[in-house]
Amino acid sequence: MKAIPLTRARHATNFVIALKQKGAPVERYLSRSHLPVELQKSTFGNNMISAVRMLDFADKAALDTGILDLGFWAGTVPIEEYGEFGRHVARASSLYDAIQTFCGEVRGECSAADYYLAQNKETAWFCHGPVGDTPFGLQQHELYALTIMRQVIQLALGSDWHPGRIRLQATNESALSGNDLLLSTNIEFGAPVTAIEVPIKHLATPLLGSVKTILSSKEAKLDESSIMQSNDPLVALHKLISSYIQQSKQPTIEIAAEMIGVNKRTLQRFLSSKAMTYSSLVDQVRFNLALPLLKDESVTITEISYELGYSNVAHFSRAFRRITGMPPKAYRHMLKQ
């Protein structure tokens, strides 16, 4: 007996949402595919269901309603709503970090998922491996995956960003014939994997929802005295840690907790609720401080590493590569191109 692929119920619920928006009889399609009517409730999202049944549901509903790009619309549900997995992706420091987090954790959403980042010196491809030998549902599965992948990229590049090139495993072009959002995209059909092209230079782009972006707004100019009144304590924490690092100090988690008037355990629980650790928060602060410094060629990479509190340049290089996929020297070189 073959392994039975499972998926979180929230992904079937996303198809339910898309169908309801089109006025389709959802319960009829759920019944046909032997899926529970509870899929209409968001509270059912963390439960596991058969991925094959979900694909059967999506495929039959799309064909019956004539919504051939149903998977595309189902995939537009914000990724932040995908439980802890979605929060981890949305809290990444950079686009590269978000893609790698997605690829590393997505099997917790679907047991058979296969996503990876393939790159060379000039471009990268965010890929979803072969769908397999499922006799139905390929098109809706692929469009759903493609739209979620595009969402991940848009976390950094903005909702107006659209891919220049994509590759699809499906061969039926009619499903996308009326989709205005992909009119300017070069689409290759019949490809071995599903993939979206991402220029290498974009991989180091910070996520738009990151603390750095919030701090750049006039409304987010915080100081230590206003931290308890802040609408977003994470923003205030980021600001405080950033200030310490810029003063050549390295606040431990104990010092950070003391600065905001809580104990270490309370701070750890708060960060955990935001899908973060104290270490990842400090890495994000350092990364955001490093980007403008790397644009100034009068400052050496060694000087930057010590200014950010790293004990040596190798530690800085490893941390920067972990977030962006490239060492700081390569990033600086890329800025010249």
Image (cartoon, rainbow, N blue to C red):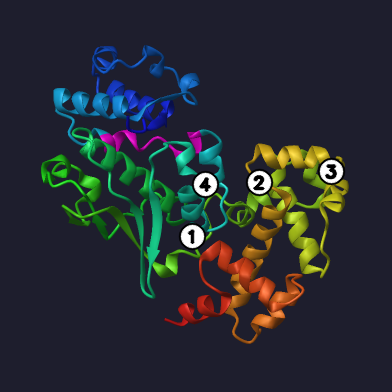
First reached walking from the N terminus: tag 1 or tag 2? 1
What residue did someone put label 3 on? 264
What residue did someone put label 1 on? 96
First reached walking from the N terminus: tag 2 or tag 3? 3
First reached walking from the N terminus: tag 3 or tag 1? 1
Q: Residue at x 18, y 57 (%)?
A: 188
- Rate crowding at label 1 as few (under 14), some (14 to 19) or many (20 or more) other CA atoms within 10 Å: many
Q: Residue at x 56, y 80 (%)?
A: 329
What residue did someone put label 4 on? 89
Disc 1 element: helix
Q: Which mark is residue 270?
A: none
Q: In the picture, which quadrant includes the C terminus? A: bottom left
Classify residue 38 by image quadrant.
top left
Q: Position of residue 217 (x, y in %)?
A: 60, 54
Mark 2: amino acid: Met
Q: CA distance from mark 3 to mark 4?
A: 25 Å
Residue 122, above or below 77: below
What segment is highlighted magenta in the picture? 71-82
Q: Position of residue 104 (x, y in %)?
A: 50, 49
Q: Are marks 1 and 2 in contact (CB under 8 Å)?
A: no
Q: CA distance from mark 3 to mark 1?
A: 30 Å
Mark 4: amino acid: Val
First reached walking from the N terminus: tag 3 or tag 4? 4
Q: In screen coordinates, is 159 left or right of 19?
A: right
Mark 1: amino acid: Tyr
